[in-house]
Image: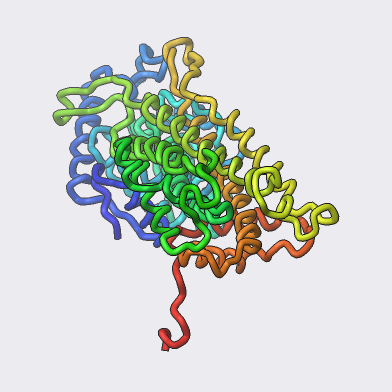
Amino acid sequence: MVELKGYGLTLNMIKEILARNLPVKASEASLAAVQKSRMAVEKIVTEGKIVYGINTGFGKFSDVRINQNDVRELQINLIRSHACGVGEPFPKVVSKVMLLLRANALLKGFSGIRPVVVERLLEYFNKDIIPVIPQQGSLGASGDLAPLSHLVLPIVGEGEVFYKEKRMLAQEALFLEGITPLTLEAKEGLALINGTQAMTAMGVVGYLEAENLAYQAELIASLSLESHKGIMDAFAEEIHIARGYHQQVETAARIRDYLKDSQLTTRQGEVRVQDAYSLRCIPQVHGASWQALDYVKEKLEIEMNAATDNPLIFHEGDMVVSGGNFHGQPIAFAMDFMKIAVAELANISERRIERLVNPQLNDLPAFLSPEPGLQSGAMILQYSAASLVSENKTLAHPASVDSIPSSANQEDHVSMGTIGSRHAYQIIQNARRVLAIELFCALQALEFRGIHLMATATRSLYEKSREIVPSIIKDRIFSTDIEKLADWLKNKSVEDMIMVPPTKQETN
């Protein structure tokens, strides 16, 4: 059981929760803070003070006072009217993380919501009752209003959910679980939907995949280095320390480690003096992507533990302030950086693919074909990689530089962070397929070089990969191979991919 406190939640914790399907609960101290904040809201309602979102309209209607008898209706009207997302739903895992993040934000005790509402979010998380949330429709300020409204609908017994591998009406799932829908009280609807949890959840899931992919990119690039009899001098520690970026230093160190006992790599002057940039500059390019990913990680972990709704309640209700913590600009920038970082991993990978298949750039059979001319071999695999890389370049255009005013110009600058996070996720899927193509081509090239000459780590990857896809003996439908390798990469860590299994004697 993982305890949420409203602070201290990390990406590694979320990774562990998802991987092991761990249940979560709210800490007693955080629930006490939530209750204090709730008492402040109830006092405001009782005394009839005018406070935005508690007894006023929303957005441009902020100057419209709401009668005390109508505050419940105000909240449900807010959820229904704002639930106007469109398009395909977010992946189930993203919506599940959204539940977790929204609960964690509310547990900070600044939102004026009842403890039972937070506990209901966590109950849905633990019982795997996952709201169906359309991906499109958020401007990223005032938070992710449309997506989070769809998140809230099942809490009040409306909308749809994913439950027991089926998509169904929320009321059906609640009936099966014996759960009674909640009635939202003053401020609760606004507190639930004013936030950045859609873009952040999408960013969290994307980052976890991107981090794994970046490690895999280094290992796959190591196979390409062996395929080209790459020059290891360019990976010498002294070169990278001389520049000073620790991510570059670490990338070079990992590649040296993967290839430490390879008989296929060379020294400068043995075969050629210098390698092309896509081989020689792997630490510089991949290292720069790691720099961006480190930035993304930092911002996500701040946002995962942030109070992002409006207004916020401080000092037991003595201070209730309308601000703009729902504005997604920090995450919008981070998502745009992640897009560029991952797109570049695919970009340089495609250039290595070209070097693997182009007979003018290597001494391997043309297009790695077993019978050049009769068999086209890997010729069109590079086309697919080039297409994916080109698509990534359009998706990598920063979403955060756009803004369209909304709510009659009351909300006159928005972040578009959710668009950025969605595009980042698409880029990650495309990049993984590009790396799958590089891996596929490198496997074939190394069979011409001699797999017995490979390093221990890369030979292990070769053996495991060949359990997924066979060698090119003759032309076949290669899209199946790409997808198989891409799916495998998505579900494996580098440690899984190069682990050398024990011999039979060692097992016994």
Viewer-side residue, 495 vs 47: 495
Q: How is the image coloured?
A: rainbow
Q: Work out which quarter of the rendered image holds the N terminus and state it.
A: bottom left
Spot occupied by residue 172 in the image (x, y as percentages of width and height): 54, 53
Numbered label tally: 0
Image: 103 above or below 479: above
Which residue appears farthest toward the front when viewing the image?
A: 269
Spot occupied by residue 470 in the image (x, y as percentages of width and height): 68, 65
Spot occupied by residue 273 in the image (x, y as percentages of width and height): 51, 44
Viewer-side residue, 367 vs 266: 266
Image: 206 above or below 370: above
Tell me if residue 420 can be seen. yes
Which residue appears farthest toward the right when viewing the image?
A: 374
State left or right for residue 310 relative to residue 177: left
Image: 400 above or below 496: above
Quadrant in the rendering for residue 21: bottom left
What's the residue at 35%, 39% (across, down)?
294
Spot occupied by residue 309 in the image (x, y as percentages of width and height): 33, 29
Q: Work out which quarter of the rendered image holds the C terminus and state it.
A: bottom left
What's the residue at 22%, 46% (across, down)?
31
Quadrant in the rendering for residue 370: bottom right
Viewer-side residue, 250 vs 334: 250
Viewer-side residue, 65 vs 189: 189
What's the residue at 49%, 32% (across, down)?
340
Tell me if residue 105 can be seen. no
